[in-house]
Image: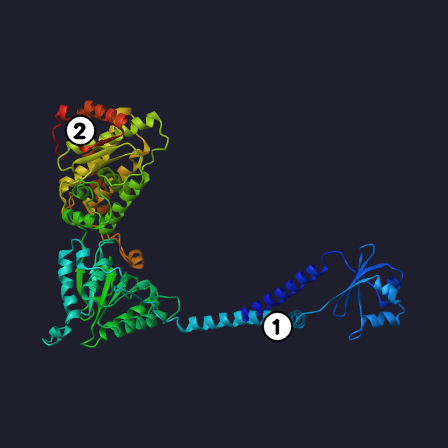
Amino acid sequence: MRNFTKNFAWAIVALIAIALVFSFLNSTGTPTRTISLNDLAAKITNGQIKDIKVSGDAINVTLTDDSKAVAKKEDGSSLTETFRNLGVEPNALQQVNFEVASESGIQFWAGILVPTLLPILLIGFIFWIMFRQARTGANQAFSFGRSGIKLGGLGKEKYTFADVAGLKEAKEELIEIVDFLKTPQKFLDLGAKIPRGVLMVGPPGSGKTLLARAVAGEAGVPFFHISASEFVEMFVGVGASRTRDAFQTAKKAAPAILFIDEIDAVGRQRGTGMGGGNDEREQTLNQILVEMDGFERDTQLIVLAATNRPDVLDPALLRPGRFDRHVVLDLPDINDREAILKIHARGKPLKEGVDLRRIAVRTPGFSGADLANLINEAAILTARQNKKEIELQELFNAVEKVILGPERRSRFISQKEREITAYHEGGHALVAASVIGADPVHKISIVSRGMAGGYTMKLPLEDRHLRTKTQFLADIAMALGGFVSEELTFGDVSTGASNDLKEATALARKLVTRYGMSALGPLTFGKDEMHPFLGREISGDKDYSEDTARRIDQEVRAFIDRANVVAHKVLTSNKKALKVLAAALMEKETLEQEEFNEILKPFKIKPVAI
């Protein structure tokens, strides 16, 4: 009703505005004088009329002084007869130029109908818009409970397992899903029940969605996909309704795959004290549980879901009969990263001789999405330099851009700050090269990238899944290398080491509270920092005493002091090497691994145990 009143008011305002515009247009120009027929007859007799133009009942008169006048004759009467009756002599009429303009049929009817029909049509158009909006709103109200599920897998972008590098074990787990969709009777004849739901678990960018598309492509079946967050609305019951609609739509197209992305948006554990039993998210989860448990035995519909937080999912969602198969996707190792880089390099002009293995070595911990972004950034950098082929240097620069951000060479840095940065990064690199357990240094730079004034890139020789206490302590000593280098060289320290100190302290605390590598023994302390339920974290108590907290702080301090002593020992005994290294950085700004090793070769640095 409020919208109707608003639209009606706007219609009235529009009509008034149109009337004012027409009134203004009609009133513009020089006003025409109106005279009677008697005056017109007298002026004709006196020879004051130049010409007369008759249009219907209107008489447009031009006087001898070129002024204009208008008169109106009697309806249906002859103008000549009218002038004769008014005593105008025929000779006087002959001195006047007469012109009769006959109205066409269109003009006649337009003059009658337009003033009448135009306002009616305008009002009708406004009411049509109003009713159309009302009808659209009603349709939206009826379709509010529909899921908006999308169909994919049948178009040009068809993926297969060949488009997914690595993930061998994950693909083997999913091959039988493909077999079931292709030949379901083979399984049903043996009484085998194919998993109704497959939950893919892995870090962001590891290829969960891509693998789901590849399953649909291999099976050649419709692929329905929707994000779990699209189920939930502020209105109670809408999420459950959309869930029913999504499952019904997918069942009609069976055999098919229904892929639910980020299922943790609605699948979080119930009974957490947030929202109560009528929480819309929980109602949506309940409907998903019912739909998955209500499948008929021969229903050829597989539900795939993806999440990077399996720890927060409700146990009922993970029990056998629902998502009873879990496929874990890990970050790619060096061989998989090389294969992924080759896939994303398809269609891009790589210069002959570019070894993607060297890029794979520099990208430990990168996901498939990160590697795709890396190749794209390299192509962009190449285009910006007006090159036709992507070279190895562009790929190296893309790695650093993805990790640290773009170069900021235009940033003004004083000579003193460049010197401090050179000694700071040189301290990091020298400690890393001197401490047992540290990773090799691949590159040192004092060129600002992102928020970093400079950086030292160290990478392991091979992918690691386990780390030792020695390696952790080496990392802490390396992090303190810049701080100690500034202190020994300039007798003062700067804010450039703030992030290094933060990382070193956090790592030392993990050694004590998470990894059991301190004098406190093989114990863990405190709750998981990534606990999914804030309410539980607030209401929970610490699992250690105040005395234990004091001892934890002491152990963290001991690790930091131990690494600080080692960094002082290395840099004090290698001051000449540090000076040469800092000078080379100030001259070249960037040193690659070969150049760095060449600088240190004359000094014959011996490894130090920490």
34 and 204: which one is in front?
A: 34
Q: Is residue 173 visible?
A: yes
Q: Nearer the viewer, residue 86 or 387?
A: 86
Please tell me whether residue 553 is drawn above or below residue 59 in the rendered image.
above
Which amino acid, by three-letter code, is at mark 2?
Answer: Val
Say which residue appears at 88% left-offset and 72% top-offset. 85
- Image height of 423 relative to 224, above or below: above
The residues tagged by marks 2 and 1 sit, at their Cα atoms, a distance apart of 94 Å
The x and y percentages for residue 378 are: 27, 43
Q: Which quadrant is the N terminus positioned in? A: bottom right
Q: Position of residue 506 (x, y in %)?
A: 24, 43
Q: Residue furthest left?
A: 190
Please report the residue visible at 35 percent of the width from the left and 27 percent of the height from the top: 414
Q: Quadrant of residue 354?
A: top left
Pick whichever of labels 2 and 1 is earlier in the sequence.
1
Task: Please indicate whether residue 402 sits to the left or right of residue 96 in the image.
Answer: left
